[in-house]
Structure formats: structure tokens, C-alpha cells
């Protein structure tokens, strides 16, 4: 299936797809991602979030098409343990193929349990892990390569590393495109709302009392997202670009509650550095484990077998085509994306809007029952917060209520919502038609006609 | 950003480019230096301040709320509560219609004053759960009877005991245990349980005094903590205060005083017996008006003794550029007051005879709830959850 060859030069074959490069960047990336995920899992566990997010809630909001993903109750700890252990094994490159597959599956499973915990960087992680299932990340500087010298190879196809870079490019570039809109660029929203809230921070806090700062941050953020990958790719600008990465994500880590994301990105961006730098990182790491020189300076090259190569390249081509199209699916829906959120997720729209909502549900039955629902009886504060601004979650919740009350004394329950949503500092107004019986509406990719019009315009992407 | 840094640290860069050892460490060091240097620039901002820059000041707001609202309001309540305790002592020593009348009048005064401090469900008020012990209604006649019989052994700290103490229990014990004043006095002077009833009255009054004294004294030390937590993250004073302020308005004013009795909530079942001060009846509108006015004054930062408006949600919102929102909210408050003045004192009767006015009042409250809960919290950017969030 695969073969390893002795080569003297990196340039093997003529076409791009046959190009070889040193395997060190891929190995460093594998180790870094494994460790970051392990730390994320530990952090999650220590914060008690496994319990509060995946065990405590009475109901969950699965993704459309993934309703078969169910919470596991107290076994969720087992799921996290598997995920953490797999992450550690990936870092070591020990039983890599099994470990990375388990890691991808367990991590993705966790993320699919409840929409209210959706974060773009979790999605990014899932996509990267999926790619890594097929990449030869364990052929160099790994326990696997140490145990099985047959797979040990210091060189790897160039495209295997570029695939990860491309994924990083998609994340940043689309995040940048999403910022080209009138709220972000012309009104400095939502940073104008978020930054003054941090004006009591030491040192940089006082800056947030100046209006121009909000615009500076907005424009810089947009420009950063659009250009950073080009600057990282280009050798002459790379170092400065990386410093910008550290500063940018360092700032976001200080300013916003976004968890591990900044650190994951700081580490991920290392992939753009030349193989030489990565070889020196490996050499540094090798000072700890003291493996023989042949293990580090290996001249063998890994290439996929002919058929495998074809299948994989086709697979990656499809994967990236989907990735390039998915963020634009919002164009298929009328009205403002930020308002309806039809096509909002999985599109690298990060920190783009300040949206708050209030949703009071009313359940009515044929037998004269009329109940104003207390959301606290069904949802956690996080779930309620997320549901109150997102129509698809309101629909799911309406169905939860319909099913609950039809079992608790309400015949043929109808579910109505009195919703009120404020977006980027605009005065709040109803998001959902209060006369629509949501119990009868079904989830689908079709436009949700019961979402009320935004009656305003946010120009741009 | 940090252009001079580029020059200063180019030697490090060269080292990396020249492939010296430990490039990562150097890179990291350079990055940290740069980050530090860049943030350092914020220490002395030289650009001319924007007009509204200095006003977005949460500390000023917290100081005004602590010094001119919470602490003096508790001071005023203390006077009324002390008076009530004194009248309680007089009545329990010699139960007569005269001492009963005095006690009842002092109870009304204290109950009205309580409406002006119930909204401070943050800091010591929240720690001591004072609302749970002071004003959970309707009173539970059955458990009051049980606790009277059990005597001192009864544990009044548990949630089940909430509706058996505080102002609602006194409402029942001073107004509801007999058809007229003579009958009420007889409740405490005749029969085998008379002494136990007196003891229970003493106990719950003393208990209110003890709990409130703790809250009131603790504020003198809590003040420093309160004004120091100037962030807006979960756990900060602004966040905790805004959340409890809105919760009080939504659950304890809108729902408790109007939504539940009128049946606008709760299965549409009208429940006139759930009005506040159900036994006294003719003060329920006064109580609602006092609580609503306290909510309005708190929003506008009006000093409890001075009557002068100071830094508040209102000024903070304006400093962030939300003048229109402030006007809309205050207009809605005016609309609520417009409904309240049309209501008679006795809300129990009103529910039974003209409930639509109660539902209409509820509807006006509901509009204000949305503005406070969504528009205001969004504008202030208050965090309600401890978990990560990448912006909805």
C-alpha cells in the first residue's frame, strides 16, 4: 500500500503532487495538536464543564442530520477520557492510526452533542483531525516509527503539509471576508460594545475609552485575517507575521472569554515555518529522549501507494471544495444572515456580532390548557442564552416542549414564542412570528418562513 | 503597532535567521517583549480624548449605588423595621386592640419600605437570602399553624419555611386570624395555644431583625469589595447587580405582583389570593408602586436621601452612546406608572372585578422586562455564563 524509498534529494518527481519535503513540520504539528487537545480536555474536566455541559442538562440540541448523537450520561467522562488518552497517543505517535481515528471520532462526537456549545475552533479541530487520520504524521519522530523502522521516513509528500496550511488559510481568510461588512468596518460593531467593557483592565484598559480604538481594532482584525496566511507563507514576511499572530491571539485571549483558541492558533501557525526550523525543534525535543541520529536524520521518503494516493487526493479535493463553498451557502437564503442565522455556523464567522435575546414560550392545548414556560425548568443558562437568539434552536426547543407537554396533560399542544432579539446595538424586536405554531413546523434546509424580517441592512459579506 | 520594537530586537531575528541555536525560545521571548511593549503604550495615551471617553466609568456608578442608594435605603428600612420590632414587643407583652393597631401600622410602614430594598439581591442581601425570609407569599397558613405548635424546635431556615415567616406571615397573623380586631387579639389571649402564638410572633419578628442586621452590617465591609470589582465578567459587581436587578423586576414585581394573581402567567388560572398582602388587601397597590418606583430610581441613580440623580445604569448607557435606549426605557417606566395610578389599593378586588386592568399592567411590565433584559444587558455587554464563547 505504501512504500518508503531512500532518496538523496527533496525534489522527487516533477509535478507538485510528487514533491517531497522534510517530515519534521508534520511531526511537530502532530505533537503540538496532541498536547493542545490533551490540555483542552484536562482544562474542561477541571472546570467541571463535562458535568455542566454534557451531563446536567435535561435536554440537548443536536445538529440537523446528527440527531442520533446522544449524550452518554455519566459515561461522558469515559468519552472525555478516551479523547484525552487518544490525544496523548497522537502526540507520542503511538498506535497513531487508531489513536487519531479515536481522537477524531470522540472529539467530534462531543462537539455534536449540543449546539449551544458550538465554537468555530472546535469545528476547525474536527476538520484538522479528520485530515490527520489520512496523513502520515507518525512516520517521523514517533513511537510508531521507533518501533517499526519500516515506516520511519524523514521525508513526506509536500501536499500533506500544505493541506493543513490550506485549512488554516480557509479559517483565517473566510473569517476576514466575514468581517467585510458595514457593521464591522463602518460602525466598529460589535467591538464598540465589547471593548469599553474592558476599560478597567490594567495597562491597556484606558485605551478602550477612545472611539478610534474600536475602529483601529476592527480594521486591523479584518486586515489581519485576510492577509496573515499570505504573510506566513511568504518567507521574507514570515517571522513578522508570526509575531503578529502571537500578539493578535494574545490580545484576544486577554480580552475575550475564548478559552484555548488563541493558543491553538499560535501553535498551529508554526506549520508555516520552514522544515529547518522544525528540524531544530525536533533536535531540541530529542535532547530529552536522546534517540540515535539515524532516527532524527532519516533519508527515507514516505509516499502513498498509487491507488491510495489517487483516492486520497480525490478525497481531499472534495473536502476542500466543500470547505470553499460551505461559507457561502448563506446566499441561498433571503434576509440578513446575522438575523436569521441560516447558514451562519461552519462558516468561520467568529466574534462577529453582539446578539442577545429573550424568548418566552407559550404552550396551548385543545383542552384549554395554557402554559407560560419557565425556561429554567428545561434549559441551562447557556442553552437558554443560545436558544434565545437562534431560530433553529427555538424550533428544537418548541419540539422539546411539545413532546413534554403532550405527555403531561396537554392534548395536541401548540407552541408559540414571544421572542425579542437585539443585534449589534440595534433596539430589540421580535425574531419569530408569535402566531406561528412551532409545534407543527419542521426543521429543514428550506428557508424558515416564520422568521420575521430584519428590516435593516448590513452591507457586505 | 510597535514599530520601534522591530528595530530594537532585530538582533534576535538575525540570530534565528542565521540559524543559531534555540530559535523557538528567542522567538517566544521576542514576541513577549513585543506584546509587553505594545501594551505598555496604553499607559499614557496621548491622543485627545473623545467627548464621552471618561464617562464610561463603572466604578463611579458602583460608588453612587453603594453610597447613595443601597446603604441609605437600608438605613431607612432599619428605622421602620426597628419601629415594627418595638411595636411587636409592645403587642406581645400586652395584646390589645390598641397595641394591635400600632403593630399593624408599623408593619405596613416597614412592608412599604421593604419594597425599596428588596431589589438589592446582591452582596450580603444575596448571601443571606434575605428576600426568601422576608417576602415569599402567599403565606402558608397550614405550616404557620404547624410551626406554632412545634414551637422553638421548628427549623425556619429551610425553603419550606419561607412562606411561614417575614412580612407575608405577619400579614396573616395580624390581619387574617380573626374577622375583626377583637377576634385577632383573642387569637393571642385565649385558648391553649395563645402563648405559643405570641412566641411565634416574637420569634419571626426577632428573626427578621437578626437577618436584616447581618445584611446591613455586612454592607459596611462589603462596600469595598463591591466598588472594586469593576469588570463586566460574571462575578463582577455590575454583572451580578444587573442580573439580580432584572430578575427582581421580572420575577418579583412583574410576575409576583401582577402576572401570577391575574393569571397572565400560570396556566391562565386567575389566583386573586396570590396578591401581595392578601390579608390586609388595601395596601397591595401601594407595595407594587413602591417597588416599581425603587426600580426606576435605581436605574436613574437617584440618591435615596438626596433625590439627586448620580452615576447609574442610565449614565453608563449614555456614556456608551445609548441615549435613545435610555429614553425608551424611561418612557416604558412612565407607561407602567400610568397603569399603576389607575389601579385601586385593593388588588385582590381588582383581580376579581376588573382583571383586564391587571393583565394590561402586566403587559406594560413585560415590555420593560425585554428592554432591560435584552437591550440593556447587550449594550453593557454583560456575561452570564462562565464557559467559552466565540461570539454567538
Image (cartoon, coloured by chain):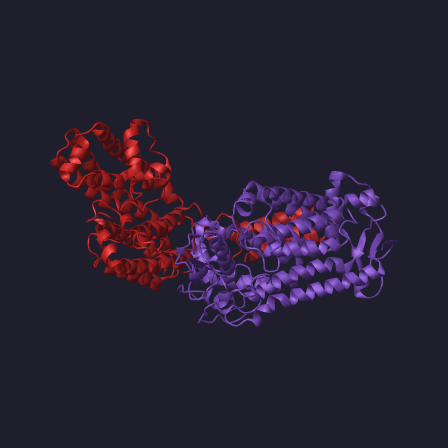
Chain colours: A purple, B red
Query: Measured along the vertical axis of the image, is residue A358 above or below residue A259?
Result: below
Residue drawn at x 76%, y 60% is A159
* Residue at point 79%, 65% (across, down): A16
Left/right of residue B326 with respect to residue B201 in the rendered view: right
Quadrant the N terminus of chain B occupies: bottom right
Left or right relative to A222: residue B338: left
Residue in the foreground of this view, choosing between B46 and A53: A53
**Coordinates of residue B111 in the picture (x, y in percent):** 23, 43
For residue A401, say whether it is visible.
yes
Q: Position of residue B349 (x, y in %)?
A: 22, 53
Residue B27 placement (x, y as % from top left): 64, 50
Tell which of B225 and A50 is nearer to you: A50
The residue nearer to you, when weighing A179 against A249, is A179
Residue B92, compared with residue B33, is above or below; it is above
Residue at the image point whose x is 63% and y is 56% from the top: A124
Image quadrant assignment for residue A92: top right
Image coordinates for residue A441, horizontal then vertical, percent? 51, 65
Q: Residue furthest left?
A: B98
Amino acid at each position: 500500500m505504501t512504500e518508503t524509498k531512500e532518496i538523496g534529494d527533496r525534489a522527487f518527481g516533477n509535478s507538485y503532487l510528487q514533491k517531497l519535503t522534510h517530515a519534521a513540520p508534520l511531526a511537530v504539528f502532530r505533537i503540538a495538536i496532541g498536547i493542545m487537545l490533551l490540555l483542552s480536555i484536562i482544562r474542561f474536566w477541571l472546570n467541571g464543564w463535562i458535568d455542566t455541559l454534557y451531563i446536567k442538562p435535561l435536554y440537548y440540541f443536536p445538529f440537523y442530520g446528527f440527531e442520533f448523537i446522544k449524550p452518554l450520561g455519566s459515561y461522558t467522562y469515559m468519552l472525555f477520557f478516551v479523547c484525552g488518552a487518544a490525544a496523548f497517543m497522537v502526540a507520542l505517535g503511538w498506535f497513531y492510526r487508531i489513536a487519531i481515528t479515536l481522537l477524531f471520532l470522540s472529539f467530534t462526537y462531543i462537539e455534536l452533542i449540543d449546539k449551544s456549545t458550538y465554537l468555530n475552533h472546535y469545528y476547525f479541530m474536527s476538520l484538522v483531525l479528520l485530515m490527520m487520520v489520512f496523513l502520515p504524521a507518525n512516520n517521523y519522530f514517533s513511537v510508531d516509527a521507533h518501533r517499526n523502522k519500516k515506516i520511519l521516513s524523514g521525508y513526506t509528500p509536500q501536499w500533506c503539509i500544505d493541506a493543513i496550511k490550506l485549512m488554516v488559510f480557509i479559517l483565517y481568510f473566510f473569517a476576514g471576508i466575514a468581517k467585510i461588512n458595514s457593521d464591522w468596518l463602518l460602525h466598529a460593531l460589535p467591538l464598540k460594545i465589547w471593548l469599553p467593557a474592558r476599560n478597567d483592565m490594567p495597562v491597556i484598559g484606558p485605551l478602550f475609552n477612545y472611539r478610534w480604538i474600536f475602529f483601529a481594532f476592527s480594521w486591523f482584525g479584518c486586515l489581519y485575517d485576510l492577509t496573515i496566511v499570505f504573510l506566513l507563507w511568504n518567507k521574507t514576511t514570515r517571522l513578522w507575521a508570526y509575531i503578529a499572530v502571537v500578539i493578535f491571539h494574545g490580545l484576544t485571549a486577554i480580552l475575550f472569554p475564548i478559552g484555548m483558541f488563541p493558543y491553538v492558533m499560535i501553535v498551529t501557525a508554526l506549520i508555516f515555518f520552514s522544515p529547518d526550523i522544525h528540524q531544530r525543534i525536533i533536535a531540541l525535543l530529542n535532547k530529552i529522549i536522546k534517540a540515535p541520529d539515524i532516527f532524527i536524520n532519516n533519508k527515507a521518503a514516505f509516499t502513498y501507494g498509487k491507488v491510495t494516493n489517487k483516492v486520497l487526493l480525490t478525497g481531499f479535493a472534495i473536502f476542500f471544495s466543500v470547505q470553499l463553498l460551505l461559507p457561502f451557502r448563506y446566499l441561498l437564503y433571503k434576509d440578513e444572515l446575522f438575523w436569521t442565522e441560516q447558514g451562519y455556523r461552519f462558516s468561520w464567522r467568529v466574534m462577529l456580532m453582539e446578539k442577545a435575546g429573550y424568548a418566552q414560550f407559550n404552550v396551548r392545548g385543545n383542552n384549554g390548557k395554557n402554559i407560560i414556560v419557565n425556561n429554567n425548568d428545561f434549559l441551562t443558562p447557556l442553552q437558554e442564552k443560545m436558544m434565545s437568539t437562534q431560530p433553529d434552536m427555538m424550533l428544537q426547543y418548541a419540539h422539546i416542549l411539545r413532546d413534554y407537554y403532550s405527555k403531561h396533560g396537554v392534548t395536541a399542544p401548540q407552541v408559540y414564542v414571544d421572542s425579542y432579539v437585539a443585534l449589534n446595538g440595534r433596539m430589540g424586536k421580535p425574531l419569530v412570528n408569535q402566531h406561528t405554531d412551532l409545534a407543527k413546523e419542521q426543521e429543514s434546509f428550506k428557508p424558515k418562513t416564520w422568521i420575521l424580517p430584519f428590516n435593516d441592512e448590513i452591507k457586505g459579506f | 503597532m510597535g514599530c520601534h520594537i522591530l528595530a530594537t530586537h532585530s538582533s534576535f531575528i538575525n540570530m534565528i535567521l542565521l540559524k543559531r541555536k534555540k530559535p523557538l525560545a528567542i522567538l517566544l521571548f521576542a514576541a513577549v517583549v513585543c506584546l509587553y511593549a505594545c501594551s505598555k503604550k496604553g499607559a499614557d495615551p496621548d491622543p485627545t480624548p473623545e467627548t464621552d471617553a471618561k464617562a464610561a466609568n463603572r466604578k463611579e456608578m458602583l460608588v453612587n449605588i453603594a453610597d447613595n442608594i443601597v446603604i441609605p435605603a437600608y438605613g431607612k428600612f432599619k428605622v421602620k423595621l426597628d419601629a415594627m420590632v418595638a411595636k411587636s414587643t409592645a403587642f406581645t407583652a400586652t395584646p390589645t386592640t390598641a397595641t394591635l393597631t400600632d403593630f399593624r401600622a408599623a408593619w405596613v410602614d416597614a412592608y412599604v419600605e421593604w419594597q425599596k430594598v428588596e431589589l438589592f439581591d446582591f452582596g450580603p442581601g444575596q448571601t443571606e437570602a434575605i428576600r426568601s425570609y422576608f417576602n415569599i407569599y402567599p403565606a402558608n397558613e397550614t405550616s404557620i399553624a404547624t410551626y406554632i405548635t412545634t414551637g422553638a424546635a421548628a427549623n425556619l431556615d429551610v425553603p419550606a419555611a419561607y412562606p411561614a415567616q417575614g412580612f407575608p406571615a405577619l400579614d396573616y397573623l395580624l390581619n387574617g386570624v380573626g374577622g375583626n380586631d377583637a377576634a385577632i387579639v383573642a387569637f393571642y389571649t385565649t385558648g391553649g395555644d395563645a402563648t405559643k402564638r405570641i412566641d411565634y410572633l416574637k420569634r419571626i419578628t426577632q428573626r427578621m431583625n437578626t437577618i436584616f442586621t447581618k445584611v446591613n452590617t455586612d454592607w459596611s465591609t462589603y462596600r469595598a469589595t463591591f466598588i472594586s470589582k469593576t469588570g463586566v465578567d460574571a462575578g463582577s459587581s455590575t454583572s451580578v447587580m444587573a442580573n439580580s436587578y432584572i430578575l427582581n423586576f421580572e420575577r418579583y414585581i412583574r410576575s409576583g405582583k401582577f402576572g401570577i394573581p391575574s393569571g397572565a402567567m400560570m396556566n391562565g388560572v386567575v389566583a386573586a389570593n396570590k396578591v401581595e398582602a392578601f390579608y390586609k388587601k388595601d395596601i397591595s397597590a401601594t407595595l407594587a408602586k413602591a417597588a416599581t418606583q425603587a426600580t426606576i430610581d435605581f436605574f436613574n441613580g437617584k440618591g435615596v436621601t438626596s433625590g439627586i440623580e448620580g452615576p447609574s445604569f442610565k449614565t453608563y448607557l449614555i456614556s456608551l452612546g445609548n441615549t435613545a435606549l435610555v429614553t425608551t426605557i424611561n418612557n416604558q417606566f412612565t407607561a407602567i406608572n400610568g397603569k399603576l395610578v389607575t389601579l385601586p389599593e385593593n388588588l385582590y378586588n381588582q383581580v376579581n372585578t376588573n382583571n383586564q386592568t391587571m393583565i394590561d399592567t402586566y403587559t406594560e411590565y413585560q415590555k420593560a422586562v425585554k428592554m432591560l433584559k435584552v437591550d440593556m444587558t447587550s449594550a453593557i455587554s454583560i456575561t452570564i455564563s462562565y464557559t467559552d464563547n466565540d461570539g454567538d
